[in-house]
């Protein structure tokens, strides 16, 4: 592991970082409000010349007291600097204002996770998504996804799609390379992969298997794209052991899906995949592992995303370390025939086949 193996901060730096953590929620909310009120936007537009507080208020309707609080906190956070009473935006402030990755992460944390995270200690104790109660009485967030408030759904889907949208273009050519034409897309969600696959080649046929609520959305998108003849639907809850997997596909595809389950559940799902494919057919898994990232910030994002699963999603899954995940793949009876790194922003593609030596 190239990160997280040295404690090389001075005592002063360490104590400083501890204060950033202690005030973490304040730092987060100030940054978000500086972004949402347009203060960062106007400072970016005015460049290095900067603006006084009064000049900012000529452009944005905001009370003087509120603006002063935001800017003074923003100085400490490093989003703005001040010279002779004029404020200008920093590089970090610019990322908070307009970096797509930062914005999907920030909106996801605020709209989906923020209130529920208050229950994290209970979730750690019970292994249940105790924070999910802020939205409703479901066992997992997936059961309630199609009924979440519109702005929460928007941030959830934007977060999910941001990473898969970046990964899919490369993944398409890697997946449809071994004569694969007929694919079962488990956890296919709103049909993004299915629609992209159908556009990728005219002879590709996809069946999406997901919870009924999600398939309603997918059905509508597929209809709008005019692809009903080549995209089919198979509503099912994979947590129910009795769920029968359809057969006869060249490959099973699971993208950002197995991280929604505990290790035991992953093995159970993969064992059922094992029973539904032949020795020639593939199980293809697209996942982001925190230990295989090129950048420490990417590993950090995945480690923190895990906590959403703990407090909000289902209480027992995470963005996995690759070693933990690969143990599940092996336990279910598969070997990784090919492992392709650096798909999209942070993903690994695992091309798995049935192990010849398995005796279950
Ligand atoms: C994180 S999304 C992944 C979406 C998509 N594959 C992608 O790469 O963007 C996980 C999907 O798994 C589905 N899912 C979660 N639990 C499920 C279950 N018990 N049975 C069937 N599908 C489930 C969710 O409905 C959701 O569509």
Image (cartoon, rainbow, N blue to C red):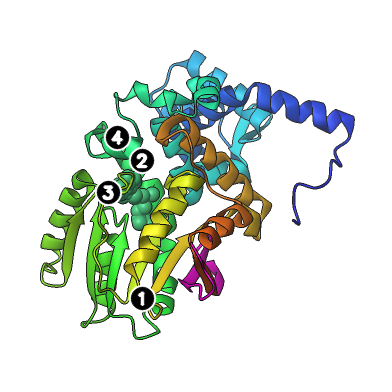
Q: Position of residue 108 (x, y in %)?
A: 42, 38
* Magenta region, main secondary structure: strand
**What's the residue at 42%, 21% (across, down)?**
62
Residue designated by label 2: 155
**What's the residue at 26%, 33% (across, down)?**
148
Residue designated by label 3: 242
**What's the residue at 41%, 47% (across, down)?**
159
Marks 1/2 in contact by CB < 8 Å: the verdict is: no
Residue designated by label 4: 151
Q: Position of residue 11 (x, y in %)?
A: 88, 30
- Distance in Å between CA atoms under marks 2 and 3: 33 Å
Residue sitting nearer the eye, 18 or 339? 339
Q: Which residue is the extreme one toward the front?
A: 359
At label 3, counting other C-alpha atoms closer than 10 Å, the crowd grade (few under 14, some 14-19, many 20 or more) is few
Q: Is residue 298 above or below residue 248?
A: above
Ligand 1 within 8 angstroms of badge 1 C-beta: no
Residue designated by label 1: 278
User: What is the secondary structure assignment of the residue under circle 2?
Assistant: helix
Q: Is residue 166 visible?
A: yes
The answer to which of marks 1 and 2 sits earlier in the sequence is 2
- Distance in Å between CA atoms under marks 3 and 4: 35 Å
User: What is the secondary structure assignment of the residue under circle 1?
Assistant: loop
The answer to which of marks 1 and 3 sits earlier in the sequence is 3
Residue sitting nearer the eye, 100 or 339? 339
User: What is the secondary structure assignment of the residue under circle 3?
Assistant: loop
The answer to which of marks 2 and 3 sits earlier in the sequence is 2
Ligand 1 within 8 angstroms of badge 4 C-beta: no
- Distance in Å between CA atoms under marks 2 and 4: 6 Å
């Amino acid at each position: 592991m190239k990160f997280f193996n040295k404690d090389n901060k001075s005592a002063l730096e360490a104590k400083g970082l501890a204060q950033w953590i202690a005030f973490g929620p304040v730092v987060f909310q100030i940054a978000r409000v500086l972004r949402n009120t347009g203060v960062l936007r106007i400072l970016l537009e005015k460049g290095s010349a900067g603006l006084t507080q009064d000049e900012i208020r000529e452009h944005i309707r905001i009370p003087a007291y509120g603006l002063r609080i935001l800017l003074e906190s923003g100085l400490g956070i490093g989003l703005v600097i001040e010279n002779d009473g004029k404020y200008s935006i920093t590089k970090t402030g610019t990322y908070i204002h307009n970096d797509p990755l930062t914005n999907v992460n920030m909106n996801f944390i605020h709209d989906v996770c923020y209130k529920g995270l208050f229950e994290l200690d209970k979730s750690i104790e019970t292994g249940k998504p105790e924070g999910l109660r802020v939205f409703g009485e479901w066992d997992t967030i997936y059961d309630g996804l199609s009924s979440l408030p519109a702005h929460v759904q928007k941030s959830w889907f934007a977060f999910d799609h941001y990473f898969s949208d970046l990964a899919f273009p490369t993944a398409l050519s890697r997946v449809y390379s071994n004569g694969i034409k007929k694919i079962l897309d488990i956890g296919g969600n709103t049909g993004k992969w299915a629609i992209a696959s159908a556009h990728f080649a005219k002879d590709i046929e996809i069946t999406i298997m997901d919870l009924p609520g999600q398939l309603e959305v997918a059905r509508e998108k597929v209809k709008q794209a005019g692809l009903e003849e080549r995209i089919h639907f198979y509503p099912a809850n994979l947590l129910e052991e009795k769920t029968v997997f359809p057969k006869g596909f060249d490959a099973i595809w699971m993208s950002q899906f197995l991280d929604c389950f505990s290790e035991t559940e992953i093995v159970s799902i993969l064992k059922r995949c094992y029973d539904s494919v032949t020795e020639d057919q593939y199980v293809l898994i697209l996942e982001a592992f925190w230990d295989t990232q090129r950048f420490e910030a990417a590993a950090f994002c995945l480690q923190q995303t895990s906590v959403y699963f703990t407090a909000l999603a289902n209480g027992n899954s995470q963005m996995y370390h690759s070693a933990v995940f690969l143990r599940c793949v092996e336990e279910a009876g598969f070997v990784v025939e090919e492992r392709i790194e650096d798909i999209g922003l942070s993903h690994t593609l695992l091309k798995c086949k049935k192990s010849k030596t398995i005796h279950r």
